[in-house]
Image (cartoon, rainbow, N blue to C red):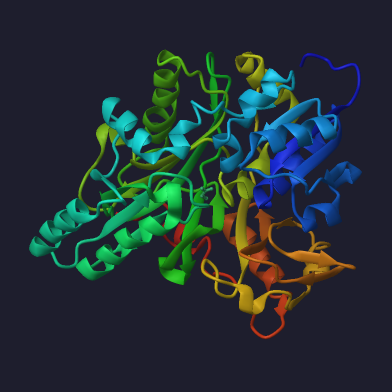
Amino acid sequence: MRAPDRKLTIAVFGNGGREDALAEAWARSPHVGRVVVSPGNMLIALKCAYGKVAVDPYCNLKSANSIVNAAVRNRADWADVAQDDALASGAVDWLQSRGIPAFGPGKWPARIEWDKFWQRRFADRHCISVPEWVPFESRDLVPAREYLAAIYETDPTHVVWVKAAGLCAGKGARKAASLAQALQRIEEMGMLGEAGATFLIEDGVDGVESSHFAVTDGTTFAHHFKTARDHKAAYDGEEGEMTGGMGAVAPAAPIGLSSWEGARFHLIDKVLVWLYLGGWPYVGILYAGAIADRWRRISIGIAPICLEHNARWGDPEAQVVVPGIETDYAEMVDAAMSGTLREVTITEDALYRVSVAVVARGYPGNTDAVRRKRIFGIEKVLKMPDIRVYGAGVIVEDNRFYVGGGRLFHIVGEGATLAQARDRVYAALDEIRDEDNSIYYRRDIGLLDLQTRGNYC
Ligand code: GLY
């Protein structure tokens, strides 16, 4: 590491469980004296990991200007731009132009996440398997209606996904299994503002999802981390609306007709090479969301089919991957930012982790009816061994916990086996009580991996 002559101050930008896990990783480094998470959340502030972590709530993640101001105000030596809106704002470029080394891709390489129409064209150009897709505009739905009518005429129960091209906090992809539902979905795109101005109608792929992550310095090297599995649907058995993520498991087993090596080569390494050759070297964490098609296709080179690329760690996947990184996080990021990642040995521990999101009743829709209801038991869970708790929308006041909005907090169980990690997280969840049935969580996170490891087909 380029030895700093003093302890570093790190500004982490984001507000969820992912940033809580990242703050913890930064704080573990002996090179780091202080971590400020902006805008952060109240549980991060309460825990103050390793006595080094603080929160500066005055930051608008959609504004590069606000992000730069927060970094300057907190005298940050480095910034970790960890959240999608912040990356799309071009904050990394602006921070660097102000002389603050920032970890994450600049606005243009990050386009692979914030413009899903562009990502699909990129994938087609470079032979990366994606579901069949067709683009449409919200301002004129006639072509989309005609397209759907043709599909459902031949197959009335066909599954399609309607996806906003822009960023929608994980809620821009909506499933439909009938013509009426699909027509409703395309109407909804118009309500998403600029994010839904262009949308895609995609063929539904029946299979099991996986999340692949690599850190890269853009030019010389990419290190692939443990693969995770995110569960995005609101309810058990993958039922209900899509959410930002209700829980995750790592390491996840390959399930279906594909391999992790295939995913890593086709969905990550190849992408990094093409971005580099296109003049946009990608520095940061690249995330490929994939699906192993259960019945119909084995994609090129036995890679799973690519559902999305994101320019950052996943949330809640970060909560099950980042705690397992043994290498000093500051040394790893420094090497990535300075183009010397090849010189660092990155290691991860052998533990399994299962993370479950506790969310407000009504999520991913309106949760106002349960706002400020009490939650009990978090203080006990915070002290449990082999358990980590990461904050999101939970309100903390005078050491009492209340429902805020959306995902409230994530509990992570760790163990030598998946079964042990899962038992631990659900034992911890048994300690959580709520007022007036105001929260819920999925009870089947990790079950698919446990029951079907490698035997899905
Ligand atoms: N877990 C999905 C995401 O972070 O986008």
Residue 223 located left or right of residue 328: left
For the question of whether residue 454 can be seen, the reply is no
- The part of the image, by quadrant, that contains residue 413 is bottom right
Q: Can you give x and y, in whole percent of width and height, for residue 169 in the image?
A: 53, 52
- Which residue occupies the foreground of this view, 347 or 431? 431
Q: Is residue 42 above or below residue 438?
A: above
Q: Is residue 160 above or below residue 216?
A: below
Q: Can you give x and y, in whole percent of width and height, for residue 49 in the image?
A: 84, 47
- The part of the image, by quadrant, that contains residue 374 is bottom right
- The part of the image, by quadrant, that contains residue 225 is top right
Which quadrant is the N terminus positioned in? top right
Residue drawn at (61%, 64%) of the image:
406
For this orientation, the residue located farthest to the bottom is 436
Q: Can you give x and y, in whole percent of width and height, for residue 202 in the image?
A: 27, 50
Q: Can you give x and y, in whole percent of width and height, for residue 62 in the image?
A: 61, 42
Which quadrant is the C terminus positioned in? bottom left
Residue drawn at (62%, 24%) of the image:
93
Residue 156 located left or right of residue 253: left
